[in-house]
Amino acid sequence: MTLVRRALDDIRANPFAHGAILLLPLIQYGANLFASVEMLLCLAIIYYTRVRILPLATAVCVIAVSMSLLWAALFLPEVPILSRELRLGVDLVLMFWLIAGSPRHDVTRVNGNWALLMLCGLFLFAAVQNVAGRKGISLYMPKGLYVNKDDGMLAGAWVEHAHEHGYDFSIRPTAFYSEPSYLGGVSLLLNFICLYTLEGRRRMVASLAAIATCAAAQTFYGALANVAVTVAFHHRRIDKMLIISVAMVALSLFALPLFAAEPGRLENILAGRDVSTGLRVTQPFELLGYVLAHDPFGIPQSLAKEFFEQRGLIVRFEDVPFHNGALNLIFSYGWPGFVVVGLLLAATGSPICALFLLLLMCQNGASLDYDKIFMLTFGIHIARGAMQRQKEIAAAMCMPRFRSEEVEEPVTV
């Protein structure tokens, strides 16, 4: 009863933040993009944020989107989907305004234990999925639940395909999500929240749980992203954190083969032969040089796949190297995209928040969808609120103390 009473007190103190954490496992579910949990959370974060309009960033975004579409209309034979490109442009501006804004909900009343319990729950589910998968038991979410239900990369779609053709499936755990890397992105968000809302051992347990979740799901990028944000948070105590950081890296490296759904995947990653790693790192950089040299104002996202297929830079019916959201902004807007990314990092207000934004945007290619708008704004606002509170406490401790009563000067007669 005490735990229930405390949970109810937390919800009364900040119903939005704790409700959002409870909805995170369902963030990819919905009938379509506009009737989904991610849209609900995006609308909620808009309502609970005092937006701050940034004239310079807004102007740069308008110029970048306009020049990209104008270049495509004048010099490219392919035709972009104008409605989608305009929606992405509006989402980009909205992301600037929300991240630079201030929260209406009381970030000081966020109980980090909720995020910690969610992390532990995701790890347990991913571990159970791993064991069940080895025994031929499918515990993956049905593909009909997801917004992108037609995506052939859904774990549930792979399991269904395997059963239809009568062979065993070997799929990395995804918990409630469509793919392991998305689970890594959610664990990064929860770990980032725990770093600023918890203290002592619970904070360390949260970081270890996030890395263990990524190890269970065999998402190497997720593990390294959690290590990077944890080390960045503890950089001022590097003497104490050095051994712990090395231990985290060792855990993320050596735990992967233990949970591996694909034998030898760690060796493929280190040798540069891993497909997922190539789609996020090596191949995007190879195509980026071509775009910047031949199309200085970028390639609109809605025609990028067709554009590269017709030029023989990617192969039809194979996965495409557009899984890095930060690089996708440069693909879309060319050289002005560097300015867009730089201003977006500056809008976060602190280096560690900028690092968190960059890591989460690189988690998959949909950097401007409503789920990313919510996750980035939610995590950065909580972190900035905690940093501001620490500064106020430090300033109060350093203030000189004055006597509360005035001393009367002696009167000379």
Image (tube, grey):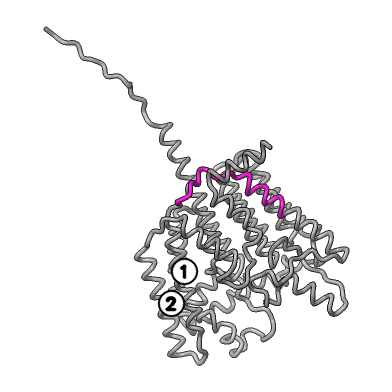
Residue 216 figure quarter: bottom right
Secondary structure, mark 2, is helix
Measured as percent of width and height from the top left, residue 297 is found at 45, 80
Magenta highlight range? 104-122
Query: At 41% across and 33% down in the image, what residue appears?
Result: 396
Q: Which mark is residue 65?
A: 2
Dot 2 or dot 1, earlier in sequence = 2
Q: Is residue 43 left or right of residue 139?
A: left
Q: Which mark is residue 156?
A: none
User: 336 or 46, which is in the foreground?
Assistant: 46
Residue that badge 1 annotates: 92
Vertical arrangement, residue 18 with respect to residue 145, above or below: above
Mark 1 residue crowding within 10 angstroms, few (<14) / some (14–19) / many (20+): many
Vertical arrangement, residue 280 with respect to residue 233, above or below: below
Measured as percent of width and height from the top left, residue 395 is found at 41, 36
Task: Measure how far apart labels 2 and 1 are at the Cα level.
Answer: 10 Å
Measured as percent of width and height from the top left, residue 347 is found at 43, 59
Which quarter of the rendered picture does the N terminus lie within? top right
Q: Mark 2 touching mark 1, by CB under 8 A?
A: yes
Q: Is residue 81 magenta?
A: no
* Amino acid type, callout 2: Val
Query: At 69% across and 67% down in the image, what residue appears?
Result: 179
